[in-house]
Image (cartoon, rainbow, N blue to C red):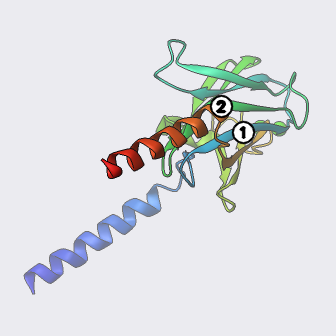
């Protein structure tokens, strides 16, 4: 009985913790292997100007600037320069460069409230940004809206040729 009570107490504690953490993690995950990622500018209703960046710690710059909420055209899109494996996380940042200068990162829990994510279609995830740090902002999440789309990467002619070579080597080895 003692063990059972402990388990119940733990369950109640974790449920309370989850209810408290009502801010969703805006991390976006690749839904399949060898996914090509396209980021499209959808819309903006904001006085401030901001840029949307892909966070990549492997790059010397720490990331790549993709789109601008006041300079990019509606429907303008950028492909990320690498492919992603299933479950691989992709993080972005939104940097306000004119107005109330600030930087919001999907990789930083302190910034999660600035993002609204719709991943009901995991191949086409929508990300809306509130560009004034909460609780100051109006939480309209339309200050900059982007779509992150996943599609199967098309093998380049070079990689098809390599696959052919690999198969040739296997069949030769079998014969030998
Ligand atoms: Ca706003
Ligand atoms: Ca707005």
Element type where label 2 sits in the image: strand
Q: Quadrant of residue 13?
A: bottom left
Front residue of 46/32: it is 32
Residue furthest toward the left?
2
Frontmost residue, 172 versus 16: 172
For this rendering, which residue is in front, 107 or 139? 107
> Is residue 34 left or right of 148 when viewed as pictured?
left
Q: Residue at x 57, y 46 (%)?
A: 26
- 117 left or right of 142? left
Question: Where residue 77 sits: x, y (%)?
Answer: 80, 33
Quadrant of the drawing holding the N terminus: bottom left
Ligand 2 lies in quarter: top right
Q: Please provide percent x and percent y for residue 81.
A: 63, 28
130 relative to 61 in the view: left or right: right
Q: Residue at x 61, y 24 (%)?
A: 103
Across and down, in percent, residue 84 comes to: 54, 41
Picture quadrant of residue 118: bottom right
Q: Which residue is mark 2?
A: 80
Residue 12 higher or lower than 70, as above or below = below
Residue shown at 56%/45% (left/top)?
34
> What kind of element bears circle 1?
strand
Label located before the other in sequence (2 or 1): 1
Q: Label for residue 38?
A: 1
Residue 98 badge = none
Asked if residue 56 shows in the view, the reply is yes
């Amino acid at each position: 009985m003692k063990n059972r009570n402990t388990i119940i107490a733990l369950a109640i504690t974790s449920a309370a913790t989850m209810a408290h953490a009502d801010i969703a993690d805006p991390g976006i995950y690749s839904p399949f292997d060898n996914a090509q990622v396209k980021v499209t500018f959808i819309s903006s209703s904001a006085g401030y100007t901001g840029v949307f960046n892909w966070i990549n710690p492997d790059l010397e710059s720490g990331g790549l600037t993709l789109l601008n909420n006041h300079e990019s055209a509606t429907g303008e899109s950028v492909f990320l320069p690498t492919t992603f494996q299933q479950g691989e996380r992709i993080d972005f940042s939104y940097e306000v460069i004119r107005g109330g200068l600030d930087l919001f990162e999907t990789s930083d829990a302190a910034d999660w409230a600035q993002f609204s994510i719709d991943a009901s279609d995991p191949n086409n995830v929508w990300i809306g940004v509130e560009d004034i740090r909460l609780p100051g902002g109006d939480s309209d999440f339309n200050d900059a809206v982007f779509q992150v789309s996943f599609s199967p990467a098309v093998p380049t002619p070079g990689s098809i040729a390599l696959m052919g070579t690999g198969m040739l080597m296997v069949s030769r080895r079998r014969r030998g």
